[in-house]
Amino acid sequence: MKDMFKLDNKVAVVIGGAGGIGESLAAGLAKQGAKVAIASRNIKKLEEVARKIQSEAESEVAAFQVDVTDERSVEQLVERVVSKFETVDVLVNSQGVNLKRDPIEFPVDDWQLLFDVNVKGVMLACREFGKVMIGKKKGKVINISSVRGILGTANGNVGYCATKGAVDMITRALAAEWAPDINVNAIAPCLVRTEMVKRAVRPESIKTFLTRVPLKRMGEPEDIVGACIFLASAASDFITGQILYVDGGLTAIG
């Protein structure tokens, strides 16, 4: 049974791999035996993260620079990853930004940036890495969504919520399009303690949020790892088109 969760000889790509959630996911996949490619715009930080994960997991980890909003950059990422590792078995889309804006005054450029990174970036990565997986008729795609794809909230999050709703539907639609060759699922956390959250969310907002979470705490990046390993492994081979809520019970009570 334990071998169902092993990822030996698999190649996993984690876009957003230098972020709080992405780094934890990359480390978790590497510790399960996968060779891991991490990618984002910040190559210096990526290289530091790659060295750290490789020293701890004793699995090969490589860093690649990419701008997920640029079509050619994503195409080149696929070329470089396949050149190094020969194939791709798992794609994790962990890239994302949040710009909190008053909906009455929402700058259209900020709205576009949210959709470029959170939606266009996910779709481009799915499209390009999907070509590799379709070619061998096997693969796993894991999109990092949010409870905000199904639960609205105030405080300037209309753009972010809209993008995560789009990610959920990309996940379901691609699951239908690519079955039976590729499993496409998403993980939807609640508020996770990352540097981005620390900068963007006021302490009083966190306190209010926790009163609505049955498990009475924020998520930690490590909380997402088990779900990712499950969806990347053979244990989830009969699961596709699903949004797995790692949210302390938040969506159970609305």
Image (spheres, rainbow, N blue to C red):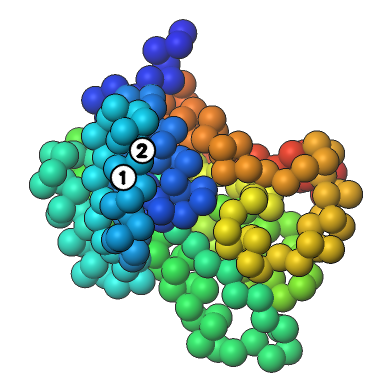
Q: On screen, 2 above or below 116? A: above
The residue tagged 2 is 53
Q: Are marks 1 and 2 in contact (CB under 8 Å)?
A: yes
Question: Residue 208, how many percent across, how many down?
Answer: 87, 57
Question: Residue 93, how many percent across, how many down?
Answer: 42, 52
The residue tagged 1 is 50
Question: Residue 144, how many percent across, how many down?
Answer: 51, 50
Local SS, label 2:
helix
In front: 17, or 248? Answer: 17
Quadrant in the rendering for residue 163: bottom right
What residue sits 84% from the left and 63% below the top? 204
In front: 13, or 177? Answer: 13
**Amino acid type of the residue tagged 1 in the rendering:** Ala
**Amino acid type of the residue tagged 2 in the rendering:** Ile
Local SS, label 1:
helix
Q: CA distance from mark 1 to mark 2?
A: 5 Å
